[in-house]
């Protein structure tokens, strides 16, 4: 059975890193819902578009990579909506790997435990979530600076 890996570009950042040349930037949080709605529409139309172009998409998604920007800035409900759109457009069930690019300082509070409910088995270069909901590792590097007593990505 052929499997499909998806890369979803999430262009939101707290600040634009000087080394980054991805299509990303600092946008108002109010744009996030609109952006996810467009992702949902694009995922729903993927099979029709593939047919129009004479292409064939595998039926099952086995991995999802949320790239940046900094996808971990998305609230959990918007990530769940994106994962739901993937399941509706492709065969449902467990997705073997879900990876989020993230600044390690963002894995605080409820974020790591909440990621376990986002619809996959998170793991990969952006960070892995252990079964107990704790951060297993994070290999993304960005210099950190103090900002209002909080570490933020620079």
Image (tube, rainbow, N blue to C red):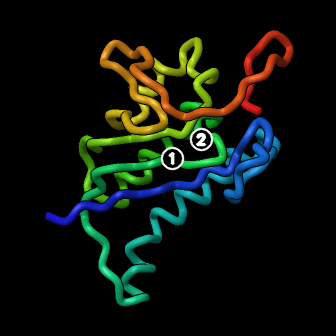
Relative to 17, say whether 112 is above or below: above
Q: Residues within 10 Å of mark 1 (few under 14, many from 20)?
A: many
Residue 100 appears left or right of 106: left
Name which quarter of the figure residue 14 lies in.
top right
For numbered disc 2, what is the local secondary structure? helix
For numbered disc 1, what is the local secondary structure? strand
Q: In x, y percent, where is residue 113?
A: 45, 18
Residue in the image at 36% along x and 89% along y: 54
- Specify the label residue 99 is tagged with: none
Q: On the rendered image, what quadrant is the C terminus found in?
A: top right
Residue in the image at 40% along x and 49% along y: 64
Relative to 109, say whether 21 is above or below: below
Q: Nearer the viewer, residue 7 or 38?
A: 7
Relative to 114, say whether 74 is above or below: below
- Specify the label residue 66 is tagged with: 1
Residue in the image at 45% along x and 64% along y: 44
Are the residues tagged 1 and 2 within 8 Å (C-beta)? yes
Of labels 1 and 2, earlier in sequence is 1
Residue 35 appears left or right of 49: right
Name which quarter of the figure residue 147 lies in.
top right
Residue 122 appears left or right of 150: left
- Residue under label 2: 71
Q: In x, y percent, where is residue 114?
A: 47, 22
């Amino acid at each position: 059975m052929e499997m499909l890996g998806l890369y979803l570009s999430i262009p939101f950042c707290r600040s634009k890193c000087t080394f980054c040349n991805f299509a990303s930037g600092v946008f108002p949080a109010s744009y996030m819902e609109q952006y996810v709605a467009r992702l949902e529409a694009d995922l729903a139309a993927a099979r029709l578009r593939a047919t129009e172009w004479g292409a064939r998409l595998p039926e099952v998604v086995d991995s999802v990579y949320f790239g940046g920007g900094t996808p971990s800035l998305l609230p959990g409900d918007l990530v769940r909506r994106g994962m739901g759109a993937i399941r509706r457009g492709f065969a449902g069930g467990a997705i073997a790997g879900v990876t989020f690019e993230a600044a390690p300082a963002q894995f605080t509070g409820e974020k790591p435990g909440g990621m376990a409910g986002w619809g996959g088995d998170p793991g990969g270069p952006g960070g892995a979530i252990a079964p107990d909901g704790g951060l297993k590792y994070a290999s993304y590097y960005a210099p950190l600076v103090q900002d209002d007593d909080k570490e933020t990505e620079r």
